[in-house]
Image: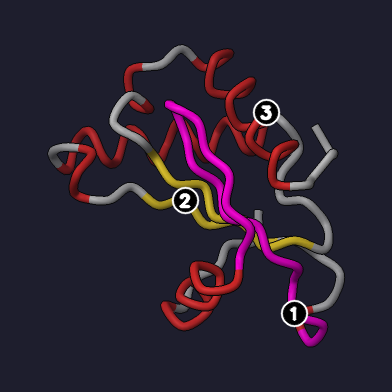
Amino acid sequence: METIKSSGEIDSLFAHGTRASNARVAILVSPTPPERGPSGRVVVIAGKKIGSAVVRNRARRVLRESVRRIGGPWPGYDVAVIARTRTASEPPEALDKAICDTLLKAGITAC
C-alpha cells in the first residue's frame, strides 16, 4: 500500500480535500496529483486526542488493516483516514462498514 508521507502533502489534503465522517472514522479525499500517476495513496492518522501511544498505535493498525481489506488504496485518489476516540475498540467488521459508508459520502464508490 502506497502511503502519503510528507507533511506538505498531508497539509494539502487537509486544505483541499473533501471531508466526510461518522462516529468511528473521518475521511479526507482528494484527487491524486497528476505527477504522481494514476495510483492512489492512503495515510492513517491518529491524533493525541485518541489516547495513549498504545491506543493510537492500535487505532492506526486496525484502520490500516480495514483499508487493506476493503480494497484500498483507491486509484486516482489520495485518502486520509482519521481515527476517532471509538476506533481502537470497535470490531473489524464495524470499521470496514464505517470506512465504506464514509468513502461513499466522500464520493468514492469503490467499496
- Helix, strand or loop at mark 2: strand
Q: Which residue is drawn at 69% across and 30% down?
A: 100
Mark closest to the chain's N terminus, 2 or 1: 1
- Helix, strand or loop at mark 3: helix
- State whether residue 66 is above or below residue 75: above
Q: Mark 1 points at which residue?
A: 33
In magenta segment, residue 26: yes
Q: Mark 3 points at which residue?
A: 101
User: Magenta stretch?
Assistant: 17-35
Q: Mark 2 points at which residue?
A: 44
- State whether residue 88 is above or below residue 4: above
Mark closest to the chain's N terminus, 1 or 3: 1
Residue 70, percent across and down?
72, 31
Number of residues whose C-alpha sits closer than 10 Å to that of mark 2, classed few (under 14), some (14–19) or many (20 or more):
some
Q: Which residue is drawn at 39% across and 40% down?
A: 83
Residue 82, percent across and down?
44, 46
Q: Dots 2 and 1: beta carbons under 8 Å?
A: no
- State whether residue 68 is above or below residue 29: above
Q: Which of 92 and 80 is in front in this view?
A: 80
